[in-house]
Amino acid sequence: MTARRGKPVLLLVLAGLALLLAGLAGVYWGTAELSWGARLEALLRLPGAERHLMLIIWEWRLPRVLMVALVGAALALSGVLMQALLRNPLADPYLLGLSSGASAVATAAIVWLPAAFVASIGLPLLAFAGAMLAFLVTLGLAFSPARGLDRLVLILAGIAVSLFFQSVSAFFLHIADPHATRAALQWLMGSAAGTVWRDLLPLAVALPLVALVSLRFSPMLDAVLLGDERAAALGVPVSWLRSGFFTAAALLTGLSVAGAGIVGFVGLIVPHMARLLIGATHRRLIPLALLLGAIVLVLVDLLCRIVLAPQELPLGVLLALFAAPPFILILRRVRHGI
Amino acid sequence: MASEPLLTVDDLLLRKEGKALLQGVGFALRPGRFYGLIGPNGAGKSSLLRLLYRAERASGGSIRFAGRDIGTIGRRAYAARVGALVQEPVSLAGLSLGEVIRLGLLPLRLAPADAAARTAAALATIGLADRADDDAARLSGGEQQRLFFGQLLALDPELYLLDEPHNHLDLHFQYRLLDAIRRRGRTVLASFHDITLAARYCDEALLLDHGRLLEQGPLETVLTPQRLAAVYRIDGHFDAGVLRVHGPV
Amino acid sequence: MKTLPLFAAAAGLLLAATPTLAQDRQIESCETVSSFTTAPSRVITLNQQATEIMLALGLEGQLVGTAYLDDAIPARWQAAYDSVPVLAEQYPAREVVLAQNPDFLFAGFNSAFGEKALGSQEEWNALGIGTYLVNVECRNLHPADVKLTTAPLFTDLERIGALFGVEDRAAAVADDIRSRLDAVADADPGQGRRAFLYDSGTETAFSAGCCGAPGLLLDAVGLTNIAAEVEGRWADLAWEAVVTGAPDVIVLVDAEWSTAAEKIAYLKADPVLSELDAVRHERFVTVPFSATVLGVRFIEGVEGLGADLAALGQ
């Protein structure tokens, strides 16, 4: 059976086109029922377009779709990095406690601090801080001067930290007024609603940077797949590589949580989808993972807005439901040697 | 064409969790010669090799390569000149055989055409040329070992470090691959369990026991019956390149 | 001769006392029926509506504990409320409730009799303690796709009145509410205008569904709910739906956890929502949280909303 499936360039071009179409769909369709002509006018900002429709498309849908695309791509890249660095196919961006840390801080803030204070600092920033806090605690627990970052210890530390922060979240949710926690729970389940253009900046800067660095170092990431010692023998600074890319993955994940709440599944499954289609060589894997992650999340977000209109579902609710079947399809086709 | 040693090790010490895995080890490797690293299990052979291919750092002593302390040589530069066959279990997934071989060329910055040529040649030598695009995950233990040999052959460094090269390989490939390496004429330091195999290839042997280098020299000189009894705990002697064993001690 | 009036007086007293002694009282609640020989005298109320019904009927003497207030008790009942111990800020633990040795539990939300709070009504009835859940919260009687009326409130007043022997007072309160509701309906302050009820939320708008108390509030003043076709008591409206709903007026629910001011600030800060007609012309009206609950103060919310709407003019 061949390791390299379809032609990589073709795959990447197709994925790119798919993303473009998905993005357009996300902007074209949504909760509001608009006529086709009105949509086109609003999208192109023609003089005859209705003002509030133009606003819906340009101030709401476009930033939201872009945010969701960035988050999907960022989580997919984080997943690729985690799985490579830990040589573990079950690794995902939240393994290092990031999502639990973000939830804990966000929940605590909503429940404990005055609403005005939370609004002025912004929940995204608090969530990001929580994610980084958990990450640092995990690293601190796992690092030993003698052995550096041992993979197994790191995974266990991440689980321990996750459990701890999950209890913190649960505690705050329990003691709080259910009315107040409604807001917290909704945000936790993932949503990019309410994204304004300004919110896109951090991720729009960080993602290309990390992606470019990852591509630059992709041969080294490949080498790590062969084993720590082999990679060292090939001249790869394994410890530095690990620390550096964990930090990058944590950064991307923290920013993603800040942008759209906790979005599971993408970081774990999209790298596998991409790997099945294009192989494990990171120079090709990374671009495809970025594109697939973006596509998955853009489409799921669209569905969340359409399925129960005029009500809106959080991302987490539909994510696994709609994203699992395509993955199973790809898995089966590859197993049958197509 | 100096006969300056390629690699010099002096008073090497490796301590881990209070135990000294290597102590007072010193030797020199001259260019172009095939050296065998022999000794019973736990003698420290793998630990020594790990220090030499820089997967670990020594606790004391010095290692000099081509006259320079290896701490002063950049990782990539060192890896381009010193290659290793590592005994590390790993499951490869999603990489093709060709891609794995190519990874062996990481320390060099080759043009794609050169890289492709070396890869193809290596695949031929290891007998897996027809499966270049196959998934490396489906290789047997022996095929995986051949693949890693192939990496090394493609890189063709000045110094080959081989940790238990015969592991998992059937006889045909044991001889075929070691022959291929010897033909290159480079400097080789390989650890051996099989004394007969060592005798066939080694110009000199380094005998390790309990973390210390007992002796360095031609195999026959090093493996006296007393040494065999003391270190290997067998009653035997070395005769015309073959080890004759009478029984355990 | 003197003993005859004495006998007559004694007989009269006996006759008057007999009905109270012999009567078997029952009260029906959702799927349970609780029976008593006399009116309960050790009542614990959970949630504000239950407490307020008791206070409105002057029954604070029968209360031994209250719990789970949502907002402030009106001034006219403050003294009565303060005379009863508060068991907990939210739902008290079951042990705490039982330790008070109650004979009747009266709740305002069905979460009170949920697993995480006090446990089911059947469990308490089996212990010999009567229970009552306000009629509007009986899910079996009021499915999520059928519009509410004010009938459940009157059912509560009638039943509680009968249980405690204060039928007259209950009837008076009920009639008062009825006539005031009719007055508002006649005045029709809403005039069919489209309304967006904004309770809380920023990712989505927590608003009124077709068939709950908030929807009933809008109906009572003659407003049209923009989410009228969404099934359920509450709805998680996407903001786009709010925009296309084109509300004429925005009804803000003011509560401690989400003030009207916060919501107005959010609406004005958003690039699309700030362009809404109702936002630009500040056609905001505010109701307290208690107005979205079908309790005895619902009518105050209705009247307040009606007055504010009338003041808004066209």
Image: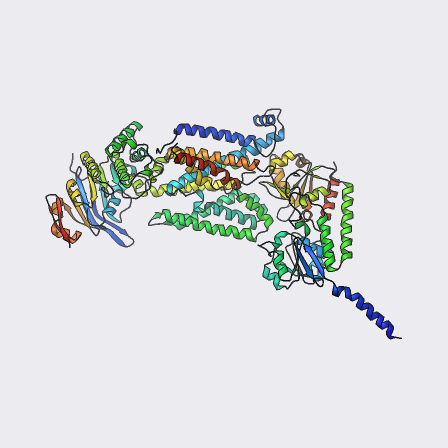
Residue A194 image point, x, y percent: 56, 38
* Quadrant in which the N terminus of chain A is drawn: top left
The one nearer the camera, A313 or A71, is A313
Judge from the rendering whether residue C116 lies leftward or rightward of residue B130; answer left or right. right
Residue C286 image point, x, y percent: 69, 44
In the picture as drawn, the residue positioned furthest to the left comes out as B240
The reply to whether residue C10 is in sight is yes
Judge from the rendering whether residue C138 lies leftward or rightward of residue B44; answer left or right. right
Instruction: Tell me the residue at 37%/46% (across/down).
Output: A151
Residue C284 image point, x, y percent: 68, 40
In the picture as drawn, the residue positioned furthest to the right comes out as C1
The one nearer the camera, C162 or C97, is C162
Depicted A53 relative to depicted A225: above or below: above
Instruction: Tell me the residue at 67%/58% (across/down).
Output: C34
Residue B203, quarter of picture: top left
Judge from the rendering whether residue C42 lies leftward or rightward of residue A116; answer left or right. right
Judge from the rendering whether residue C121 lies leftward or rightward of residue A208; answer left or right. right
Instruction: Tell me the residue at 67%/36% (across/down).
Output: C247
The reply to whether residue A213 is in sight is no
Depicted B125 relative to depicted C198: above or below: above
Residue A186 image point, x, y percent: 56, 44
